[in-house]
Image (cartoon, rainbow, N blue to C red):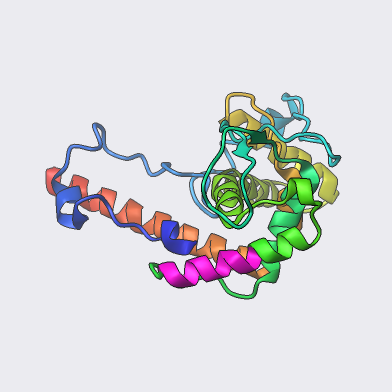
Amino acid sequence: MFTDCRIYPPGGFSNFLQSDTFANPPDGNENSHFVGGGLSQSSFSPQYLGATRTPFPAQETDHIVNDLDAEEDEIININNDSRTDKRLNWTVPEDIRLASAWLHNSKDPVDGNGRKADAYWTDVTEEYNKTTETSRKRNRNQLKIRWDRSKKPLSDFHGCWVNASRVWQSGMSDDKMIDKALEMWSSQNNGKAFNLLHMWKVVRGEQKWSAYLARLKKGNETMQRLIQLKWQIWI
């Protein structure tokens, strides 16, 4: 699943440098959701954030989670990746079980190795379905798609939390720090509330999640260098 963390521009690096993808020179703030990049303390001062009401995340109940701007997964045979027309919405407990299954499988597949990727997600699916009632079980494809759709908002929010921690380094409880991070995330997403807090609480602080974020940051830095090189050549 780490294939999306490596940056390969369409057509190769040489075509990327010759393309007209970017109409204006970069200002150094693209993809600021990655950990350690983009957000400055001046952009989100305590005074600014205090003027914004904290958006309420999804409550940690059995309620449906509507957060990824995507259609619900379909009810399908857990032993078959084919699709049918019926829909099966995701709930908060199901998201939590998915995040836990992702964490508890010790290693992700090697980049670009499809066989190992399939084997890895087969193990995740087996663990997930062990504690899932029959009518709510899902197959490998459903779980992988849900996780792939969740990674970006999760990493976005984690970046907000890191930046909030830098601004308010002491004298604030963990809950208050999370509230500030929620305000940051909402301000970057047109006032939309972050509804995957239940998943983030599962992965935060875990070594596997930290390693994923480090690879994500490295990929972002690589892309930034390519963008800067493109504009140096253009100038």
Q: Nearer the viewer, residue 79 or 208?
A: 79
Q: Is residue 203 visible?
A: no
**The image quarter in which residue 129 lies:** bottom right
Q: Quadrant of the C terminus?
A: top left
Is most of the magenta stretch helix, strand or loop? helix
65 sits left or right of 14 in the view: right
Where in the figure is residue 55, as x and y percent of width and height? 75, 29
User: What's the residue at 35%, 59% (across, down)?
Assistant: 222
Vertical comparison of 213 with 20: above or below:
below
Q: Is residue 115 magenta?
A: yes
Q: Nearer the viewer, residue 67 or 143?
A: 143
User: What's the residue at 63%, 45% (across, down)?
Assistant: 157
Vertical comparison of 184 with 138: above or below:
above
**The image quarter in which residue 126 lies:** bottom right
Q: Which residues are magenta?
A: 114-124
Where in the figure is residue 107, as x and y percent of width and height? 58, 74
220 sits left or right of 207 in the view: left
User: What's the residue at 75%, 46% (across, down)?
Assistant: 136
Where in the figure is residue 168, as x and y percent of width and height? 73, 47
124 sits left or right of 173 in the view: left
Where in the figure is residue 112, as x and y percent of width and height? 38, 67
